[in-house]
Image (cartoon, helix red, strand yellow):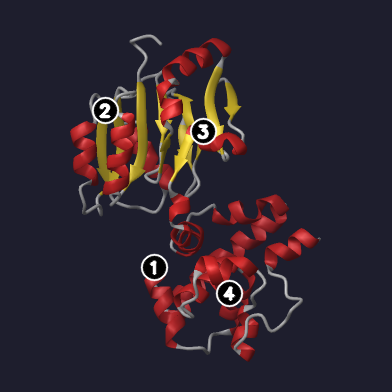
């Protein structure tokens, strides 16, 4: 790999001191520097760790705006990364494995020879060749627009050899609370796309339209703020919800599961996951038992049956 071509580790983060320290320590010997966006709400040593270890990179601070694609553009165009450089993209809770890092520059030489410009896994890039017309799009599940060359995809069954993912260490946070947060707190969000696009564009568009209408009504008619804390406080304050509110919680498993977790105090892995999407919010309000109808199917299960 030419000395004129740099390899950068990049991402966005906030209040992830322990994870960032782990990522930096495992990665710094293999890259030319770190280019990261750190949100200004970060109160721990996340910023300090990245600044101390940035090498030839640059750390940018910006306010948290609930749009990962826009936040990523700050590190992408911080003035350090040049055309033809390669970028490792990491989330705070994930990093490239030691196995991949140990041979990544050799792999990049191979990719250059073979015309490969990006390496994807789970639908998004973890490594790509930078050019100054590229952008990061969407939130929370961002993607690279205009990759150059062929795209190499790591099969899901081989992912663990290339990428270390810590999300499974806290499934409640990442597979319950994050789902609710991205549906509720984020105005611009492609979480519905992640949930429903497999069932067709019309299905996805329906759920995204309903999500937007629900958020507006909650703010304008119930006075709720777009925080999970505000939603939780409202859910605990009454069991007499407007019909449109009840209908939406019945439609979207991310919200009914949030209710079960925060209001009923159920355990995500032990109580919610085993019969996921077979619990009815409406039945619970009517009878006190969300499993009262043994034939009940949640929204996605109905789509799958069709």
Rounded to the nearest angstrom, the CA distance separating label 4 from label 3 is 39 Å
Q: Where is residue 292, by image quadrant? A: bottom right
Q: Quadrant of the C terminus?
A: bottom right
In terms of secondary structure, where does tag 1 sit? loop
Q: Which of marks 4 and 3 is in front?
A: 3
The residue indicated by pointer 2 is 57
Q: Residue at x 34, y 11 (%)?
A: 4
**Label 2: few (<14), some or many (≥20) within 10 Å?**
many
Q: Which mark is residue 249?
A: 4
Residue 139 appears in view: yes
Q: Nearer the viewer, mark 1 or mark 3?
A: 3
**Label 3: few (<14), some or many (≥20) within 10 Å?**
few
Q: Which of marks 3 and 2 is in front?
A: 3
Q: Would you say 84 lies left or right of 269 here? A: left
The residue indicated by pointer 1 is 227
For residue 258, above or below residue 36: below
Q: Tag 3 or tag 4, which sits nearer the N-term? A: 3
Q: Would you say 69 lies left or right of 74 here? A: right
Rounded to the nearest angstrom, the CA distance separating label 4 from label 1 is 16 Å
In terms of secondary structure, where does tag 3 sit? helix
Q: Are marks 2 and 4 in contact (CB under 8 Å)?
A: no
The residue indicated by pointer 3 is 161
Q: Tag 4 or tag 2, which sits nearer the N-term? A: 2
Rounded to the nearest angstrom, the CA distance separating label 3 from label 2 is 27 Å
Q: Tag 1 or tag 4, which sits nearer the N-term? A: 1
């Amino acid at each position: 790999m030419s000395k004129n071509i740099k390899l950068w580790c990049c991402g966005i983060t906030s209040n992830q001191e322990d994870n960032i320290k782990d990522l930096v320590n495992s990665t710094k010997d293999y890259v030319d520097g770190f280019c990261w966006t750190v949100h200004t709400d970060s109160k721990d040593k996340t910023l300090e760790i990245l600044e101390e270890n940035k090498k030839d990179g640059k750390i940018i601070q910006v306010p948290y705006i609930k749009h990962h694609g826009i936040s990523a553009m700050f590190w992408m165009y911080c003035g350090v990364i040049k055309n033809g450089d390669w970028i490792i993209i990491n989330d705070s809770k994930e990093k490239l494995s030691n196995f991949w890092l140990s041979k990544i520059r050799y792999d990049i030489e191979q990719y250059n020879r073979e015309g490969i410009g990006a390496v994807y896994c789970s639908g998004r890039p973890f490594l790509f060749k930078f050019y100054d017309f590229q952008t990061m799009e969407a939130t929370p599940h961002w993607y690279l627009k205009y990759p150059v060359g062929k795209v190499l995809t790591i099969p899901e069954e081989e992912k663990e050899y290339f990428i270390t993912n810590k999300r499974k260490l806290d499934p409640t946070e990442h597979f319950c609370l994050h789902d609710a947060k991205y549906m509720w707190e984020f105005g611009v969000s492609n979480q519905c796309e992640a949930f429903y696009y497999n069932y067709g564009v019309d299905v996805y568009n329906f759920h995204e339209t309903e999500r937007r209408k629900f958020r507006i009504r909650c703010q304008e008619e119930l006075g709720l703020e777009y925080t999970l804390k505000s939603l939780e406080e409202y859910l605990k304050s009454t069991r007499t919800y407007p019909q449109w509110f009840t209908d939406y919680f019945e439609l979207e498993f991310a919200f009914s599961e949030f209710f079960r977790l925060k209001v009923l105090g159920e355990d995500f892995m032990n109580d919610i996951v085993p019969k996921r999407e077979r619990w009815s919010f409406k039945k619970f309000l009517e009878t006190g038992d969300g499993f009262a109808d043994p034939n009940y199917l949640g929204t996605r299960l109905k789509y799958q049956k069709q």
